[in-house]
């Protein structure tokens, strides 16, 4: 087989996906594992949809911020592409994603990007999604469906690491086909395992789940298969999320919860501060199990919350009730919120963002403040263009390092109606 062509080039930036953008005589090539300012040698691998890709064969001139990654699997796994960079460079790279998302928009050049660093850069994740392919359990590799056989992950909190070992020991020999496993910390030190199988499974897996649920670290297990019935469950599959001094949030296995407790506490405080909802009519979209809802409901005159997952809505109602709070929480599509007059809009969409809301909903322009929590700066950029075209300007920008070492950034943007 002919060997892949080698080229040399200079790294100009790190893109939103975590790949280095390398300028070569053949044009721009995207390459994992390189940092801005470096000169590198690359083997060209593929060219998909206009983007040439390669893999790093040599670093010819290293950036001063390059560091040895603390994880032995960092380069193979792809989950933490920035682990080779100092914390300061990681911060600068991620801030540039947010700056680029807002560039040229009304208010952006007058608004400084505030930054909230994670207190822990390892052992910070309370939730992880891993994959299996037959007996191989691990993370999907960057830009690939291939499941890398990862034995441990040092960004997970200790109970999740222990649970991962238990999953491997109990289930690896019984899993068929492909599927996903969500590990969620419950309380301080136990884990709920949520298995989602895409292929038919054998009765042996049910026995293996039974054995897994007996492990002291495991609070409960759910198994969803292609059968139309509900999931099989073992033990207690309720996820309990401590909220600092306040009452814990509760939700069923598999519903969304934020991944980094200390950053989430800062995020919730900032959302409440920026919404400034005291005595106002608030619309909250993508409310999940009520992470922001329970704080907003305590301040707002009225609160309407919309969430598409019925199990999350039920959990949110329970979380409000346990605190003696009231809000109207509805199962629905955030792109078509209930008609009404709202002073403040808070939204926290998944990566796809909220295009239909900004393009078509007659809720906008109505609220005097929009507080947008985003986990994807590409869709954030698109939605901010739409929002500013409807008469809003940016007045606060905050980056939260929810996922140290990864290329993911949690951003909080406040827009004010001009
Ligand atoms: C990033 S999570 C945020 C949840 C919550 N704000 C939190 O902090 O935990 C996004 C939420 O949006 C919900 N969601 C996704 N698409 C939706 C849609 N079209 N309409 C309403 N909710 C949606 C998901 O079920 C998920 O709970």
Image (tube, rainbow, N blue to C red):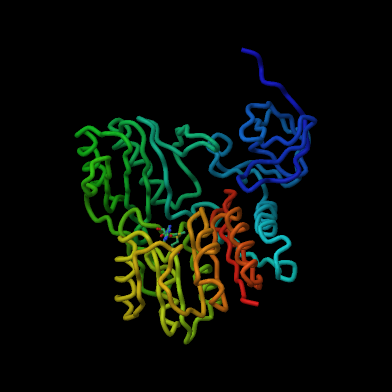
- Nearer to us in this view, 110 or 393: 393
| Picture residue at 33% right of the left edge, 37% below the top | 198
| 294 relative to 30, above or below | below
Q: Residue furthest bottom?
A: 279
| Picture residue at 34% right of the left edge, 64% below the top | 331
Place residue 324 in its image quadrant: bottom left
| 100 relative to 21, above or below | below
Please state the horizontal and vertical placement of residue 34, each as a whole percent of the image. Answer: 69, 39
| Picture residue at 36% right of the left edge, 38% below the top | 179
| 295 relative to 90, above or below | below
Left or right, 308 with respect to 356, comes to: left
Task: Assign the N terminus to one quadrant of the image.
Answer: top right
Q: Which residue lies furthest to the top in this view?
A: 1
Please state the horizontal and vertical placement of residue 36, each as a whole percent of the image. Answer: 74, 44
Task: Assign the C terminus to one quadrant of the image.
Answer: bottom right
| 320 relative to 387, above or below | below
Left or right, 71 with respect to 333, comes to: right
- Nearer to us in this view, 126 or 384: 384
- Nearer to us in this view, 181 or 178: 178
- Ligand 1 location (quadrant): bottom left
Please state the horizontal and vertical placement of residue 161, each as a whole percent of the image. Answer: 41, 46
| Picture residue at 37% right of the left edge, 63% below the top | 332
Is residue 285 shown to the viewer in this render? Answer: yes
Q: Residue furthest right?
A: 25
Please state the horizontal and vertical placement of residue 407, each as a whole percent of the image. Answer: 59, 49
Is residue 72 shown to the viewer in this render? Answer: no
Left or right, 283 with respect to 192, comes to: right
């Amino acid at each position: 087989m002919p060997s892949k062509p080698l080229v040399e080039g200079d790294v100009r930036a790190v893109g939103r996906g975590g790949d280095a953008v390398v300028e070569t005589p053949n044009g721009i090539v995207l390459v994992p594992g390189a940092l801005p300012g470096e000169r590198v040698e690359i083997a060209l691998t593929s060219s998909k949809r206009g983007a040439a890709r390669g893999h790093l064969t040599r670093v010819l001139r290293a950036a001063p911020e390059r560091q040895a990654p603390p994880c032995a699997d960092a380069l193979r796994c792809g989950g933490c592409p920035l682990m080779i960079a100092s914390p300061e460079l990681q911060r600068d790279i991620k801030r540039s994603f947010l700056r680029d998302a807002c560039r040229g928009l009304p208010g952006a050049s007058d608004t400084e990007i505030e930054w909230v660093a994670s207190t822990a850069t390892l052992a910070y994740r309370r939730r992880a999604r891993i994959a299996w392919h037959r007996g191989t359990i691990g993370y999907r590799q960057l830009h690939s469906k291939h499941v890398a056989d990862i034995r441990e992950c040092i960004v997970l909190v200790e109970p999740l690491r222990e649970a991962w070992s238990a999953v491997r020991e109990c289930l690896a020999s019984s899993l068929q086909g492909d599927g996903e496993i969500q590990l969620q910390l419950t309380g301080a030190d136990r884990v709920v395992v949520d298995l989602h199988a895409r292929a038919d499974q054998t009765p042996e897996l049910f026995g293996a789940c039974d054995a897994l649920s007996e492990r002291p670290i495991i609070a409960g297990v759910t198994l969803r298969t292609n059968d139309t019935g509900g999931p099989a469950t073992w033990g207690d599959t309720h996820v309990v999320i401590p909220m600092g001094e306040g009452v814990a949030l509760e939700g069923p296995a598999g519903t969304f919860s934020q991944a980094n407790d200390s950053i989430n506490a800062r995020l919730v405080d900032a959302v409440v501060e920026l919404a400034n909802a005291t005595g106002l009519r608030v619309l909250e979209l993508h409310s999940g199990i009520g992470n922001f809802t329970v704080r907003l409901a305590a301040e707002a005159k009225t609160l309407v919350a919309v969430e598409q997952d019925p199990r999350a809505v039920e959990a949110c109602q329970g979380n409000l009730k346990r605190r003696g709070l009231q809000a109207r929480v509805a199962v629905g599509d955030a792109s078509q919120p209930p008609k009404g007059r709202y002073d403040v809009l808070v939204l926290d969409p998944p990566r796809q963002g909220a295009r239909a809301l900004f393009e078509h909903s007659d809720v906008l322009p109505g609220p005097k403040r929009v507080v947008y929590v985003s986990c994807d700066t590409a869709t954030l950029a698109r939605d901010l263009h739409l929002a500013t075209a409807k008469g809003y300007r940016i007045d606060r920008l905050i980056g939260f390092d929810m996922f140290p070492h990864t290329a993911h950034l949690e951003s909080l943007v406040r827009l004010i109606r001009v």
